[in-house]
Image: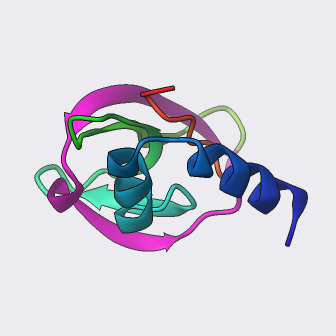
Amino acid sequence: MTRKAREWQQWISKRPKVIRDLAKRVPPDYIYRIKATRQECAIVSYYEDGTLKVWVNSWFPVFVPDEPAQFGYEVFGYKPEDLEQLRRCVQTSAKGGSA
């Protein structure tokens, strides 16, 4: 188990059951698609009301060809059923909203 995986397990084990269940249903180490807008996003926070805060990704090529700059913004209030799991991402960045 990696250091990040151990840290995640330690962090999630101290959260309320609703957060643990939400994190199991919508793991933070995946990229998701928002069904309504077709935009890609990543999980930022979990909330005890069963909603999520996500970082919405927007890619625009600027200045250097084939080297996209990354832009995005955070949106809260999404429900797990609003998202479609796409692919595993490299880094876990979730920090629960109920800490």
Residue 97 percent coordinates (x, y)? 43, 28
Which residue is rendered at x = 59% and y = 42% of the image? 14
Tell me, yes or no, if residue 20 can be seen here.
Answer: yes
Magenta segment, which residues? 65-91
Is 7 situated left or right of 79 in this image?
A: right
Q: Is 44 part of what is drawn in magenta?
A: no
Residue 84 percent coordinates (x, y)? 27, 67
Is 18 situated left or right of 90 in this image?
A: left
Residue 82 percent coordinates (x, y)? 16, 55
In this rendering, the answer to whether 34 lies above or below 46 is below
Residue 24 percent coordinates (x, y)? 43, 65
In this rendering, the answer to whether 67 lies above or below 45 is below
Q: Quadrant of residue 70?
A: top right
Is 92 situated left or right of 94 in this image?
A: right
Is 82 situated left or right of 17 in this image?
A: left
Pick the front one: 63 or 15: 15
In this rendering, the answer to whether 86 lies above or below 19 is below
Number of marks present in the image shown: 0
Which residue is rendered at x = 61% and y = 63% of the image? 89
Which residue is rendered at x = 45% and y = 46% of the image? 43
Which residue is rendered at x = 21% and y = 41% of the image? 78
- The main secondary structure of the magenta stretch is strand
Q: Quadrant of residue 5?
A: bottom right
Tell me, yes or no, if residue 67 can be seen here.
Answer: no
Q: Is 73 part of what is drawn in magenta?
A: yes
Pick the front one: 23 or 72: 23
In this rendering, the answer to whether 5 lies above or below 51 is below
Q: Quadrant of the N terminus?
A: bottom right
